[in-house]
Image (spheres, rainbow, N blue to C red):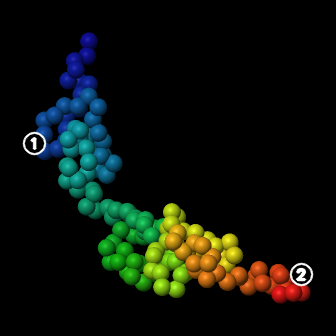
Amino acid sequence: MACFSDLSKECDMEGCRNHDFLPYKCEYCKLIFCEFHRNAEEHLCSKLKDMELNTVVLCEYCGIVLPDKKEDIQNHLIYKCLYKKKKKSILMCNKRDCKKVLNGINNYICKKCRKSFCLPHRYSDVHNCIKSDEEKSFFKKYFFFF
């Protein structure tokens, strides 16, 4: 019958005497480590320092893949990034002296002039409604009395 110590492997980290039944093999130095020293940074892997890590960063604005160097990322964001900040146009009431900002709740589009107004100015006699040019041209085209 096999002894349990034959099935487990001892951690190769200097000073660590842990035995693991499921040991981890480092992908860089190929040594065996316990769960506490399984990452290359945790066991100070000598091969990791020699290898150049090819890590990349995805630009969160335009989606371009960049090398993970701080200077390259800053240079991209300052000069090369294709992302343009869109200015949000603020919709305001079209009544001459009204400064109300319109949103989905207080916005009314007049059926005659097709302009946006706040609720107090939604009536055509209040905002001095003038029919749109499209409507005028329609009547001029089909009716001669305009």
* Nearest the eye: 122 or 54: 122
Q: Which residue is mark 2?
A: 142
124 relative to 53, above or below: below
| Relative side of 41 to 145, left or right | left
The picture places residue 100, in percent across and down from the top left corner, at: 45, 76
In the picture, which quadrant includes the N terminus?
top left
Q: Mark 2 near mark 1, Cβ–Cβ under 8 Å?
A: no
From where the camera sits, is residue 84 visible? no
| Relative side of 35 to 60, left or right | left
| Relative side of 115 to 16, left or right | right
* Nearest the eye: 84 or 112: 112
The picture places residue 23, in percent across and down from the top left corner, at: 27, 35
Q: Residue furthest top?
A: 1
Q: Residue furthest left?
A: 15
Disc 2 crowd, CA 10 A, few/some/many (<14, 14-19, 20+): few
Q: Which residue is mark 1?
A: 15
- What is the three-letter code of the residue carrying label 1? Gly
At mark 1, the secondary structure is: loop
Q: Quadrant of residue 8?
A: top left
- Residue depicted at 67% across the width and 83% down the height: 130
50 relative to 15, above or below: below
- Residue depicted at 29% across the width and 39% down the height: 24
The picture places residue 21, in percent across and down from the top left corner, at: 26, 28
* Nearest the eye: 48 or 37: 37
Label 2 to label 1: alpha-carbon separation? 97 Å
The picture places residue 6, in percent across and down from the top left corner, at: 23, 24
- Residue depicted at 27% across the width and 56% down the height: 47
99 relative to 24, above or below: below
- Residue depicted at 58% across the width and 69% down the height: 108
- What is the three-letter code of the residue carrying label 2? Tyr
Q: Of the numbered discs in the image, which one, if any, rests on residue 65?
A: none
From where the camera sits, is residue 3 visible? yes
